[in-house]
Image (cartoon, helix red, strand yellow):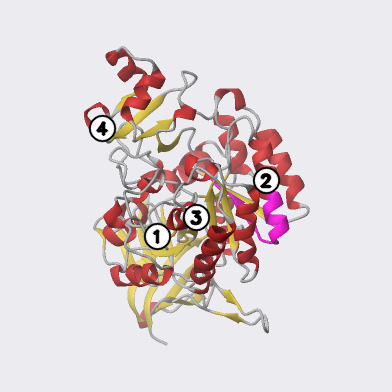
Amino acid sequence: MRYDSVIKGATIIDGQNQPPYVADVAIIDDEIVAIGQLDTSNADVIVNARGLVLSPGFIDVHTHDDTNVIRMPECIPKISQGVTTTIVGNCGISASPAVLKAAPPDPMNLLGEQKDFKYPTFASYVEAVNHAQPAVNVAALVGHTTLRNNVMDDLYRTATPDEIDAMKKALRQALDDGALGLSTGLAYASAKSCEESEVLALTQELSRVNAIYTTHLRTEFEGILDAMDEAFRVGMAAKVPVVISHLKCAGAGNWGRTVEVLKKMDKARQAQDVGCDCYPYTASSSTLDLKQVTDEYPIFITWSDPHPELAGQMLSHIADDLNLSLMETAKKLQPAGAVYHNMDAQDVERVLQYPLTMIGSDGLPNDPHPHPRLWGAFPRVLGYYCRERKLFPLSTAIHKMTGLSAQRFNLTKRGEIKVGYFADLVLFNPDEIIDTANFHQPKQVAKGIQTVWVNGKISYQLSTEVQGRHGRFLRRKITEPANNQIMEMNS
């Protein structure tokens, strides 16, 4: 057998939370075909990996790259940190199926301008991704707020029965076209007014096809336990898995409460299928939300439509210069973006260590001064939290960003190094890997990533950066209700 390439002598961490071992890995086309001590005389390409770790490609389960994987298909912030699959459509906002008659409402504006929303059906989005052929694989959720915006004339109320029926129809079609499931962003004003029954009606569509429900809770501040209860009630009633997005305890008065939060997760997991994702930072980032304006923690303004000249400063400094209160200043800047330094370091570490926690960057690629998580989330977990802080073994850290994520989101033959699996792989130096992006200079390539393969092809090397775009759209693994036969739809 002739191999396209052999990765020789790597320390393999296979994504299953198992101990490392040293072996060679052979690739033909897009597939891992052999693992062991291999004869390299019949390999077209040999990569010397001695002293380096070979892991599955990282799966970023929480992103807002919906339009960017098409408009900027090199995906350098992702591929440069070892991400080979990005899941879009989080927090209730997705690029499809979207029909915009005006500028996108907050927070859909995080995904781009009105002209960037060109995908009235999920199928049209799939086609556009495959045509663009981004550097990374793409899988997608359908956003609740996107569905609402399609059918409602007022987002600040709950939907009528007819509007819910229209949303269900659109969601059903998207699921049939391969969407992973539904996401909500209930903390945002454009969805906060919806009643729990509206969400439940939509999630019942998910159980028909074994899809998933992810949610940005109604609040991550004082009322977080009640917000979690709502998410779990919806999941239980609809009989669908629930993933809590970017689990955190936000706000100074909320610090330390991850102990309670994780106890509630433990209780819920005894009765239903639940999980969460987390980004490895003590600051969040989104649009400028008046409900989060406070002097309890620093708020950095990343952009402002009416006053772009004031962006790149702390809100408090802008307020002082304008001789206005924080709230008056925030209103003057809107619509705008902000980074909120609103979390406690111990809370972040507790959530990262939790067994059900996956890693998601939650990066905002359209932000002119993005949160550094866009470029550095995964190397930060490996370098800072694993190697320096010693929160968990390297095999556990890798599992949280590969095998656990692929299993949770039903990504067929991804997330593990196994014969017959797709060759999405990352070769890195475990002693050097670290994020270099920071809050002052957020657009910085991480250290320690040597080579990244996507679908069997070298797609990134530290020396030459992007080498070719080999990503695909990954459809959900479909279960036919009639005979429960699983069809592979990853192509």
Depth-wise, is mark 2 or mark 1 nearer the camera?
Answer: 1
User: Residue drawn 59% across and 65% down?
Assistant: 211
Q: Mark 4 vs mark 3: which is more N-terminal?
A: 3
- Quadrant for residue 28, please give it: bottom left
User: Residue drawn 55% across and 27% down?
Assistant: 251
Q: Is residue 240 magenta?
A: yes
**Label 4 CA crowd tier, 10 Å (few <14, some 14–19, many 20+):** few
Disc 1 secondary structure class: loop
Residues rendered magenta in the picture:
232-245
User: In the rendered view, does 293 fall on the left or right side of 366?
Assistant: right
User: Residue drawn 32% across and 13% down?
Assistant: 320
Q: Is residue 78 visible?
A: yes
Q: Position of residue 350 (x, y in %)?
A: 62, 37
Q: Which residue is mark 4?
A: 306
Question: How many angstroms separate mark 2 from mark 1 (CA)?
Answer: 26 Å
- Quadrant for residue 19, please give it: bottom right
**Label 1 CA crowd tier, 10 Å (few <14, some 14–19, many 20+):** many
Q: Which residue is mark 1?
A: 98
Q: Is residue 52 visible?
A: no
Depth-wise, is mark 4 or mark 3 nearer the camera?
Answer: 4
Question: How many angstroms separate mark 4 from mark 1 (CA)?
Answer: 26 Å
Disc 3 residue type (three-letter): Val
Q: Mark 2 vs mark 4: which is more N-terminal?
A: 2
User: In the rendered view, does 203 fall on the left or right side of 154?
Assistant: right
Given residues 178 and 306, the one toward you in this image is 306
Q: Is residue 364 magenta?
A: no
Question: How many angstroms separate mark 2 from mark 4 (CA)?
Answer: 37 Å
Question: How many angstroms separate mark 4 from mark 3 (CA)?
Answer: 33 Å
Kindly identify which numbered label has been placed on residue 61: 3
Q: Position of residue 44 (x, y in %)?
A: 32, 79
176 versus 453 height, above or below: below
Given residues 135 and 197, the one toward you in this image is 197
